[in-house]
Every structure is written in C-alpha cells, then in structure tokens.
Image: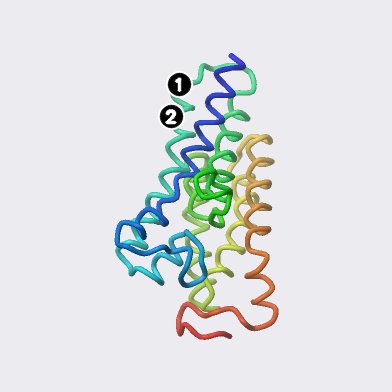
Amino acid sequence: MTITYIVALILSYLVGAIPFGFLFSRAVGKDVRQEGSGNIGATNVNRVLGKKLGALTLLCDIAKGFFPVYLISVLLPDVPGRVFFIALCGLATVVGHMFPVYLGFKGGKGVATALGVFLFFSPFSILIALFVFIVVVALSGFVSAGSLAVSALIPLLIWYFGAEGSTIAITGVIAGLIWVKHSSNIGRLLRGEEKSWKTGKTA
C-alpha cells in the first residue's frame, strides 16, 4: 500500500506540473514566459495570447487540480487516513503547477489548480469564493488582490462547511503557498505599482 501511495503522489505532482499555458503559447509560436508577467498561468496567457487561450488555460489548470484527487478518491479503498491522503495528492498537484519539473521548477502561482482541488472537496465553498473574487477584482481592478483574498478565505469556508481537520490543514498549506508565490504582487500592490486588470496601467 505504501508504494501505491507514493506512486499516486508522484503522478499527482506530474499531472499538476503539466504547463498548459506554456504548451498553448508554444503551439502558436510564442513563449508566454518571455512576455507579459512571464507567468504560465491563465491571467498572463489571456494578456499575451487572448481570451480564448486564456480561458482554455484556466479550464485545463482547474481540471488538472480536480481530476487527480477525484480519480484517487474513486480508486483508493476506504482505509484510515484516506481523506488526508487524498488532500495530500491535491497539494501535490498544486506544488506541481508551482514548481513543474518540465520547466526547471519555475511555474505558475497555483490559483486555478488549487481551485480544482477545492472544487472537489467543497463545491459550495468555491461558489462563495468565486463571488468574492469577482467582487474584489471588480472593485480593486487587480486579479492578484482577488486571488489573495480568496486563498485566505477558502480554508475558513471549507471549515465552515464541515471538512475534516486534515483537509482544512492541507487547504491552509495551499493557501500559504499561494501567498508566497504572490509575494512580488503583494509588494507591487503595497507600492502602488501593480497593473490594473481594468486599465492595464499601474495603480
């Protein structure tokens, strides 16, 4: 069983590490890492390559967070620690996106992939979080502000809707990683240098 767990964790990481934004940009003869913010996530793909590829990147990044934990939940027998291990595989997918082996461990910020993981554990939490995200981005003009607000809120929502303690803990770790990956955005927000989603200009 231990080998099965290790294989599942590795596969979760490898799926999470698939750099869809980079692959889509290469398919049209560009490298999204060299343009815009240099990030491989949906926000930068949308900025550099347009809404269609941005939306496709978003969907694929969400899917690679959701399906590994879903498949493991179907295949894994009902054993002690099952929920914790499923959550751990969710963490592995997010880490894969943030630090993909395919791109020298330089990846995205993990928001969309984390969204897929959270969607599996608590769909109602995601509905509320999406509403909060839209409101924060609409009012502030900054996608990063919405991402930070939602990542901080999600562990509380998942707790409120009755998730197990292990799931809440893993969710907190994922939220912390998202904040760490947004450290440069936080600095720009504090300095008034972050680009607005509404105008494309700094605050």
* Foreground pick, 49 / 90: 49
- Residue occupying image coordinates x 54% and y 43%: 101
- Residue occupying image coordinates x 35% and y 56%: 24
Quarter of the image with the N terminus is: top right
- Residue occupying image coordinates x 45% and y 21%: 75
The answer to whether the residue labelled 2 contacts the one labelled 1, judged by CB atoms less than 8 Å apart, is yes
Between the residue at mark 2 and the residue at mark 1, the CA separation in whole angstroms equals 6 Å
Q: How many numbered dots are placed on residues in this image? A: 2
Residue found at the far top of this picture: 1
Q: Which quadrant of the view contains residue 171?
A: top right
**Amino acid at circle 2:** Leu
Q: In the figure, 62 relative to 75: above or below? A: below
* Foreground pick, 26 / 52: 26
- What label does residue 71 carry, if any? 2
Q: In the figure, 196 relative to 17: above or below? A: below
**Amino acid at circle 1:** Leu
Q: Position of residue 186 (x, y in %)?
A: 67, 70
Q: In the figure, 76 relative to 169: above or below? A: above
Q: Secondary structure at mark 1?
A: helix
Quarter of the image with the C terminus is: bottom right
Color style of the picture: rainbow
The residue that label 1 is drawn on is 75
